[in-house]
Amino acid sequence: MKEIEELKILKDKAYDYCVCYVSERLKRIQHQINELETALTSETKSSAGDKHETGRAMIQLEREKLGQQLSELEKTQQLLSKVPRNKAFQAVGLGSLVVTDFYIYFISISSGEFKYNSKSIYCISAGTPIGKLVFGKSEGDIFHFNNKPIKILTIH
C-alpha cells in the first residue's frame, strides 16, 4: 500500500513539473516576443535605410519563429490538460507512470528529467522513441531499447 501511495505522489509531482515546464517556457517566449515588439517600435528611420530595413526584417523573422514556438507550446499545453490524473492503468497510456528495471517514465509531454527524493522521472511524450516502445504494454512486458531488454515492473 505504501508503494502505491509513493507512486501516486511521484506521478503528481511529475505532472506538476510538466505544468511548471510549460508555464516557464510560455513566460520566456512571451517575454522574448515583448522584447521584439519593443525593438520593432523603437527602430527609427535613419540615413542608412537599407540597414534599417534589414534590422526590421530580422526582427520580423524572429517574431515569426517565436510565434511558431508559441503555437507548438499551446498544443503541448492542450495535450497536458488531457493527461488523466487519477486513472488506473492496465496498459501504458497517456498519464501513465511506468516503472521499469532501469528508469521511471511519466507519459505526458517531453519535458526532460525530473528529480524527486533522489529518484529520476523522465517526462516523455508518447511520440518519443521510448514512448512508442512502451505505449500499450503491460506490467511484466519487456521491450528493447539500444539493444537492452527493459522490463516494465509497475504501471500507475
Image (tube, rainbow, N blue to C red):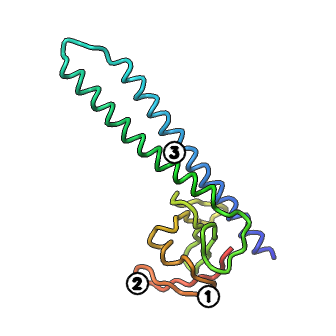
Q: Residue at x 41, y 40 (%)?
A: 66
Mark 1 crowdedness (10 Å alpha carbons): few <14, some 14-19, many ≥20: few
Q: CA distance from mark 3 to mark 1?
A: 36 Å
Relative image position of residue 128 (x, y in whole percent): 46, 68
Relative image position of residue 45 (x, y in whole percent): 27, 14
Above or below: residue 74 compared with residue 92: above
Q: Nearer the viewer, mark 2 or mark 1?
A: 1
Residue at the extreme right? 1
Q: Nearer the viewer, mark 3 or mark 2?
A: 3
Q: Nearer the viewer, residue 131 or 67?
A: 67
Left or right, residue 145 beside residue 123: left
Q: Tell me the quarter of the image containing the N terminus.
A: bottom right
Q: Which residue is mark 2?
A: 147
Question: Could you tell me which secondary element the residue under label 1 belongs to?
Answer: loop
Q: CA distance from mark 3 to mark 2?
A: 34 Å
Mark 2 crowdedness (10 Å alpha carbons): few <14, some 14-19, many ≥20: few
- Say what amino acid the circle numbered 3 marks: Arg
Above or below: residue 17 compared with residue 98: above
Above or below: residue 27 compared with residue 86: above
| Image quadrant assignment for residue 67 | top left
Q: Which residue is mark 1?
A: 140
Q: Nearer the viewer, residue 53 or 24?
A: 53
- Say what amino acid the circle numbered 2 marks: Asn
Relative image position of residue 83 (x, y in whole percent): 64, 61
Q: Residue at x 80, y 74 (%)?
A: 2
| Image quadrant assignment for residue 44 | top left
Question: Could you tell me which secondary element the residue under label 3 belongs to?
Answer: helix
Q: Which mark is residue 25?
A: 3
Q: Tell me the quarter of the image containing the C terminus.
A: bottom right
Q: Which mark is residue 1?
A: none
